[in-house]
Amino acid sequence: MSENSILSKLADRLKEWDGELDQLRKKAESATAENKQKFEQMAEEVRQQTAAVRAKVEEYRHKSADEIKAEVQTELDELLKKTSGRISEGLTKLSRFFEERSGGSGSA
């Protein structure tokens, strides 16, 4: 896998996570003040994880191909493995948070 395809893969995954978080944020708009606060606390954890991935992607975008080849595969793969699970888990928790408060309404 080339360094450009890795960066593209990460950028695409970041867009997916951002989209999921935006959808959950829309649900939070109609929540009680207490639930909005809980949502924001959980969402902040997700934002911190995506920020770590985003920062690394940006760092590599400013390096030469040779510099990237020397470190990108291992480092980015490790970062993605480390943060992907946390981000997905955070988004799942946020989704469940609203499902539990709505009594499961709106689910298929």
Image (cartoon, rainbow, N blue to C red):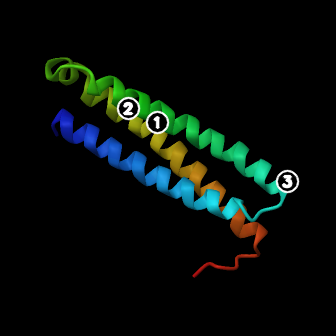
Where in the figure is residue 75, as x and y percent of width and height? 33, 26
Q: Secondary structure at mark 3?
A: helix
Type of amino acid at the residue the image marks with label 1: Lys
Residue in the picture at 34% in, 23% down: 59
Residue in the picture at 84% in, 55% down: 33
Q: The N terminus appears in which quarter of the rendering?
A: top left
| Residue highlighted by disc 2 | 78
Where in the figure is residue 88, as x and y percent of width and height? 52, 51
Q: Secondary structure at mark 2?
A: helix
Q: Secondary structure at mark 1?
A: helix
Look at the numbered discs 1 and 2 and tell me whether their residues touch, using CB distance below 8 Å: yes
- Above or below: residue 52 compared with residue 13: above
Type of amino acid at the residue the image marks with label 2: Glu
Residue in the picture at 65% in, 55% down: 93
Q: Nearer the viewer, mark 3 or mark 1?
A: 3
| Residue highlighted by disc 3 | 34
Give me the C-alpha separation between circle 3 and circle 1. 30 Å
Look at the numbered discs 3 and 1 and tell me whether their residues touch, using CB distance below 8 Å: no
- Above or below: residue 8 compared with residue 66: below
| Residue 82 - label | 1
Please state if 2 lies on the left or on the right of 47 as rendered.
left
